[in-house]
Each structure stands twice: as structure tokens, then as C-alpha cells.
Image (tube, rainbow, N blue to C red):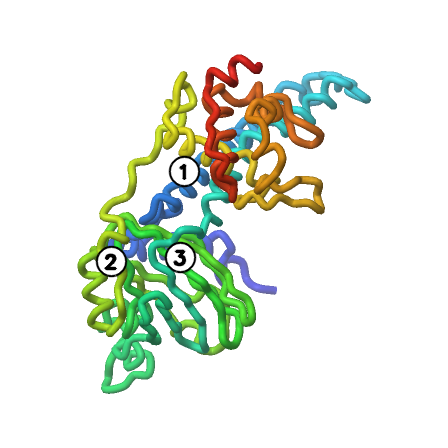
């Protein structure tokens, strides 16, 4: 048998590990300063929206967890056997059955509404100012600007490669952005909507720059799309996020966001043909105040189309599709060229207010201005060009 006191006890081992961790953090203040628990808000309006959604969900989940644990703790302490409390009988309780069905439904509905709106925005790759085709290779990235005639490959920077191989005594700690720099970065203009078409020439890769939004897999024989609009000039770094072979760690991504003038100059230096300067935005358009528009008694045509598109994308596009083509197999008809969207405007308003078949009644959910706006949008977009427009007063009269 081992003599008492010999060896290292479990408590002593744990204490040693904790002390070593504390001393390590104290000795490495720079590493400690960069440590964080929460997600980064990113550098685009969309990443900010995702971050806000994440924060809201985290608060909801934390509140539910704290509430459940608090009730459990109170119940265990208050109704413990040592106090002589007799357990209550809840067998086939209608009230409890209703409560644990209705309350989760309300919570899920509150989460689903903003989540659906964010997902719709995430997949809106239409009307990009700059289109870039990306192809993943083992182990580099290929970039092509089809509209500008620019094409190049982006590989791991030479100094990182020398440090990785130990050439000429180069050490990783001597290289800035070791394994995170490339020879030819992707260059895009600030404030412009950048549309990406991503595929692969060999195995599955994944294009991921955290500050510019979620990752998107590069799959052979398939084109996946994503978009981003960078709000600030700067350099943003990412990495292939799918294990793609032995060189997976050596295919970083670097995106340089530059001014419009610098972007056009870069295209010219690359021998490409740039868009007209006026075709690239100078600054993001001010977001529409949809709440204020929804409370209006009158709307201009532009205001109605702006508010109508917002309402349509949030409530109607899941069934009728963003382009109005519908889902006939599921019983959701196309709006493009439909009798409702091109027929009498009063019938169109009436159907939005009161619903029909699987379509819910939106009269109790939307204001007069919102209904008028979405009707106007459906009749003058989605492939329709009726030319008329609904007014909030018409909606009020038909309620």
C-alpha cells in the first residue's frame, strides 16, 4: 500500500493547475486583454443585426433559465420532506397542460418573428454593386470579377510560408499575422453591396471572414451565394472553416475594404474595366423609419413602395417567394400576373384584410398604411406593372 502522505492528492493537483493558470494569465497581460466571451458585432449592418438578435435570444434564454432554477430552488427548499409537506396532486390538470403549451408557443413566436426577418435579409443577394466569383482549391483561393475582367489567385503570404518551413531561420513569432496573410487580398469598395458566388474545384472548403458575416461552404459542382456591405475601410481576415486536407491551415482569407476611388484605381492597375464612379454608392442610404411610415395617413408612391417591400419581405415572401413566383405545390399561388394583383384594387385590399383559404387575415396585424403599401408594392413590383396605388383611406373604408 502507498504510505499516507506520499504522492500528489487530487485536491493538490487541482490547486496546482488553478495556480498555474492564474500565474500564466498574470504573466501574459496581452493575451488576457484580447480574451472575450461574447461574439464580435462585426463590421457590417447585417452582422450588427445578427449580433442584436443573438443578444436578445441570450437574454431570453438566460431569463428563462434563471427563472426555472429559482422556482426549482424555492420549491425544493419550501416543500422538502423534512418539513412534513405533502406533495400536491397535478394529475391531468387542464390548467398546467394549457400553461406549458401556450407559454412556450408565445416564447417561440417572439423569437421566430425577428429571426425570420434576419434570415430573409441574409439571403437577399439581389442587386449587388460588385459581383465576385470565388473558387476554393487545395490550398488557395481563386477570385474572379466577371464584370471587371479581373482574375487572380490568393495564396498564403511568403513570409508565413518561410516561417512555417523554418527557411533562413524565420520564426513564426517574427512574422506579423502569421498564417493570416496572403499575397493577393480580395479588394472591395466600402459601402457597396458585394455579392459572392462560392464554389470549389476539388473538396469542400468554407469561405469565412467573421467581421463580414457568416461562413459559406464551397462545394464542388454547386454555387452558394452570400453578400456583405462593409461599413468601414480596413483589412478583415478570415480562414477556410472546413477541414479540407493537410494544407487546411494554410489558406487564409484577407479582404481589403477601400474607398471608391482606391477601388477603381486598383481595378485599373489590374487591367480591369471598372464601373462608372456613380454606379458605386458613396455612403449607405439612411434606413427608412418603417414605424413612422406605418402610422401615416397618407403615403407618397416611393414611401408606399419602400414600406410595402418591407412588409412583403417580412410576412408574404415565405409563401409567395421574394420574386412573387409562389409555391404552387404547397398551395401558395404566384402573385406575378395573378388575378388578385392585377385585378380590381378593392378586391386586392379586401383579401389582405380578411384573408382567403390558407392566407391569414392581416387586418388585425397591419395598419391601414401598411396594408395600402403592401398592396401597392404587389401591384407594381414582382413582375407586375398595374400602375395604380392603394391609399390608407381606401383600406380604412373597406375594413
- Which quadrant does the N terminus fall into? bottom right
Residue 161 to residue 351: above or below: below
Residue at (77, 20) in percent of width and height: 90
Cα distance, mark 2 to mark 1? Answer: 35 Å
Instruction: From the image, tell me which residue sits under label 2.
Output: 276
- Marks 2/1 in contact by CB < 8 Å: the verdict is no
The residue that mark 3 highlights is: 195
Viewer-side label of 2, 1: 2
Q: Is any part of residue 378 visible from this angle?
A: yes
Q: Nearer the viewer, residue 41 or 288?
A: 288
Residue at the extreme bottom of the image, as rendered: 168
Counting from the top left corner in percent of width and height, residue 222 is at: 55, 66
Q: Earlier in the sequence, mark 3 or mark 1?
A: 1
Q: Is residue 301 left or right of residue 82?
A: left
Front residue (pair 14, 179): 179
**Residue occupying the point 39% across, 72% down:** 141
Q: CA distance from mark 3 to mark 1?
A: 23 Å
Q: Residues within 10 Å of mark 2 (few under 14, many from 20)?
A: few
365 up-or-down from 324: above or below: above
Q: Quadrant of residue 161?
A: bottom left
**Relative to 327, 252 lies left or right:** left
Badge 1, how many Cα within 10 Å: few under 14, some, many 20+?
few
Q: Position of residue 181 (x, y in %)?
A: 29, 69
Disc 1 target residue: 52
Mark pair 2, 3: CA separation: 18 Å
Amino acid at each position: 500500500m502507498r504510505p499516507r502522505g506520499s504522492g500528489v492528492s487530487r485536491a493538490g493537483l487541482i490547486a496546482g493547475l488553478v495556480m498555474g493558470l492564474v500565474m500564466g494569465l498574470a504573466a501574459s497581460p496581452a493575451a488576457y486583454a484580447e480574451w472575450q466571451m461574447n461574439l464580435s458585432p462585426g463590421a457590417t449592418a447585417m452582422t450588427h443585426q445578427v449580433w442584436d438578435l443573438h443578444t436578445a435570444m441570450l437574454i431570453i434564454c438566460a431569463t428563462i433559465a434563471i427563472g426555472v432554477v429559482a422556482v426549482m430552488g424555492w420549491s425544493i427548499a419550501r416543500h422538502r420532506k423534512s418539513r412534513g409537506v405533502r406533495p400536491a396532486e397535478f394529475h391531468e390538470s387542464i390548467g398546467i397542460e394549457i400553461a406549458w403549451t401556450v407559454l412556450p408557443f408565445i416564447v417561440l413566436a417572439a423569437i421566430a418573428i425577428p429571426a425570420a426577418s434576419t434570415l430573409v435579409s441574409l439571403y437577399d443577394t439581389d442587386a449587388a454593386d460588385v459581383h465576385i466569383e470565388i473558387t476554393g482549391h487545395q490550398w488557395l483561393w481563386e477570385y474572379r470579377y466577371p464584370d471587371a475582367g479581373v482574375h487572380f489567385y490568393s495564396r498564403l503570404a511568403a513570409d508565413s510560408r518561410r516561417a512555417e518551413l523554418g527557411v533562413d531561420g524565420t520564426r513564426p513569432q517574427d512574422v506579423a499575422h502569421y498564417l493570416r496573410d496572403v499575397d493577393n487580398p480580395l479588394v472591395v469598395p466600402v459601402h457597396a453591396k458585394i455579392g459572392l458566388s462560392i464554389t470549389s474545384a476539388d473538396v469542400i472548403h468554407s469561405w469565412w471572414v467573421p467581421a463580414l458575416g457568416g461562413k459559406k461552404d464551397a462545394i464542388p459542382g454547386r454555387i452558394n451565394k452570400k453578400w456583405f456591405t462593409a461599413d468601414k475601410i480596413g483589412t478583415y481576415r478570415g480562414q477556410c472553416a472546413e477541414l479540407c486536407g493537410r494544407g487546411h491551415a494554410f489558406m487564409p482569407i484577407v479582404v481589403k475594404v477601400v474607398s471608391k476611388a482606391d477601388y477603381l484605381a486598383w481595378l485599373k492597375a489590374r487591367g480591369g474595366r471598372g464601373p462608372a464612379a456613380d454606379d458605386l454608392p458613396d455612403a449607405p442610404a439612411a434606413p427608412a423609419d418603417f414605424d413612422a411610415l406605418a402610422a401615416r395617413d397618407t403615403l407618397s408612391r416611393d414611401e408606399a413602395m419602400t414600406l410595402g417591400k418591407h412588409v412583403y419581405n417580412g410576412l408574404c415572401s415565405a409563401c409567395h417567394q421574394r420574386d412573387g413566383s409562389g409555391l404552387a405545390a404547397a398551395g401558395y399561388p404566384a402573385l406575378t400576373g395573378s388575378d388578385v394583383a392585377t385585378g380590381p384594387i378593392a378586391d386586392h385590399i379586401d383579401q389582405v384584410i380578411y384573408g382567403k383559404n390558407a392566407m391569414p387575415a392581416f387586418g388585425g396585424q397591419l395598419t391601414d398604411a401598411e396594408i395600402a403599401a403592401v398592396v401597392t408594392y404587389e401591384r407594381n413590383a414582382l413582375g407586375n406593372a398595374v400602375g395604380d396605388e392603394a391609399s390608407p383611406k381606401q383600406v380604412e373604408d373597406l375594413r
